[in-house]
Image (tube, rainbow, N blue to C red):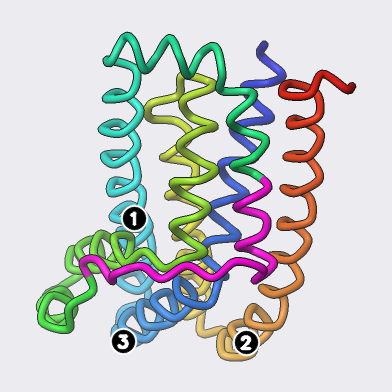
Amino acid sequence: MIESYWLGAVSAFWLGILTSISPCPLATNIAAVTYIGKQLDAPRRVVGSGIVYALGRMATYVVLGVLLVASIASASRVSDVLQSYISKLLGPVLVLVGMVLLDLISLRLPMIGSSEKWQRHATSGGIWSAGLLGLIFALSFCPVSAALFFGSLIPLSVKQGSYVVYPALYGFGTGLPVIVFGIGLGLGAGWVAHALHRLTQIERWARYATGVIFIAIGVYLTLKYIFGVL
């Protein structure tokens, strides 16, 4: 049981990392790095802004996770059904999420919380505005991030009964690159632009590898819990 929980925690963190380097979230993280880079005259403020930005993202996903997981758990009938069938449901869900990651399925979602007005307001303040920026960008779900959060993290959190820890690890993972680049900028490192370029190249391979793993695990769970083959 403990091993399963820690494996789930590592998975939640990896899902956050994968989200952070996916095209849409990566673009928002680059925007955040650009904002943070404007404070180069104060290295501590640069590092602090990166941390506050990550905390803003983390807080958003924790609130969403608590609301969703707690709401599901509080509905006794739904909770009983999920406890009985979560293993059966998780297999097909992972297959679908894997297909999204492999670009085999295309999702179209309305943009949430990404208005230019709010972004301009978030970048007009001091270091704490980085937290607001993180909150806004965290709500800007695109197909990949929505599939990873709603299709993978939430079912995983429900299965393990993790209201806070898993969403927090996921949120920290989504903001970790900005913390790293913020530290790099604060130290005057010149590799930040190169590293961002490399991330765009790594993202596809990481996403495809995760997609293949998700489909493989999903097929395994489907065969085991639905068809009883394994």
Magenta stretch, main secondary structure, is loop
Callouts 1 and 2 close, C-beta under 8 Å: no
Q: Which mark is residue 57?
A: 1
Is 119 situated left or right of 159 in this image? left
Q: What is the distance, in whole Å, between disc 1 and disc 2 at their CAs?
A: 25 Å
Single out the mark in the foreground, 1 or 3. 1
**In the rendered image, which residue does mark 3 sit on?**
41
Asked if residue 224 is positioned above or below residue 205 in the image, the reply reads above
Is 145 situated left or right of 118 in this image? right
Q: What is the distance, in whole Å, between disc 3 and disc 2 at their CAs?
A: 18 Å
Task: Report x, y in % for residue 25.
Answer: 45, 71
Callouts 1 and 3 close, C-beta under 8 Å: no
Q: Amino acid at mark 3?
A: Asp
Q: Amino acid at mark 1?
A: Arg
Which image quarter holds the C terminus?
top right
**Residue in the image at 73% along x and 21% along y:** 225
What span is in magenta? 95-113
- Observer-nearest of 149 and 198: 149
